Image (spheres, rainbow, N blue to C red):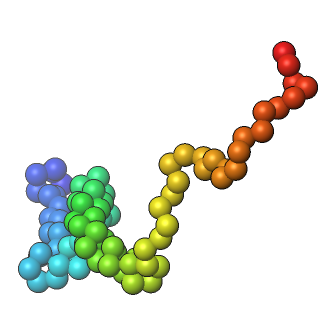
Amino acid sequence: MSASSAAIERPDIRPKFMKNPIMTLRYYSRTRPQYFWPSAIAFAIPVVGFVGYPLRLKFYGNHEPVPRRYPLPKRDRVPLEGYDD
């Protein structure tokens, strides 16, 4: 048997996109994850932005903003004594 006569025919295992898109997504998530996952994240970010923000407001409401500086006490400052350098 020579190498040319014993050629192995490999079936096309790539799924047809229009027939079964879920299978296509599974195929590319396993064979080419470097392209699939960044694309999936890029498509999910706007959805999370438009859906997640109203849901956060619905369930948690508006919150008190985080203070940007340490709040000072509302009293007169008493000078310290006995700690001279």
Q: Report whether 25 appears left or right of 63.
A: left
Q: Describe residue 33's horizontal placement relative to residue 67 as left or right.
A: left
Q: Is residue 38 above or below residue 26?
A: above
Q: Is residue 45 among the parts visible in the rendering?
A: yes
Quick one: which residue is furthest to the top in this view? 85
Which quadrant would the N terminus be assigned to in this image? Answer: bottom left
Residue shown at 43% from the left, 74% from the top: 62
Of residues 55 and 33, the one drawn nearer to the viewer in this rendering: 55
Within the image, what quadrant is residue 40 found in? bottom left
User: Residue at 16% of width from left, 82% of height from top?
Assistant: 20
Q: Is residue 27 visible?
A: no
Q: Is residue 77 above or below residue 57?
A: above
The front one of 29 and 59 is 59
Label count reads 0
**Among all residues in the image, which is located at the extreme front?**
76
Quadrant of res 82:
top right
Q: Of residues 47 and 55, which is closer to you in this image?
A: 55
Return the x and y of residue 16 as percentages of the image width and height.
11, 76
The residue positioned 47% from the left and 79% from the top of the image is 60
Left or right: 64 with respect to 19? right
Q: Is residue 73 left or right of residue 25?
A: right
Q: Position of residue 50 (x, y in %)?
A: 25, 73
The location of residue 58, given as percent across then percent down, is 39, 84
> Is residue 52 shown above or below 28?
below
Query: In which quadrant will I find the C terminus?
Result: top right
The residue lying toward the viewer, choosing from 38 and 32, is 38
* Among the 4 quarters of the image, the one containing residue 21: bottom left
Q: Position of residue 57 (x, y in %)?
A: 38, 78
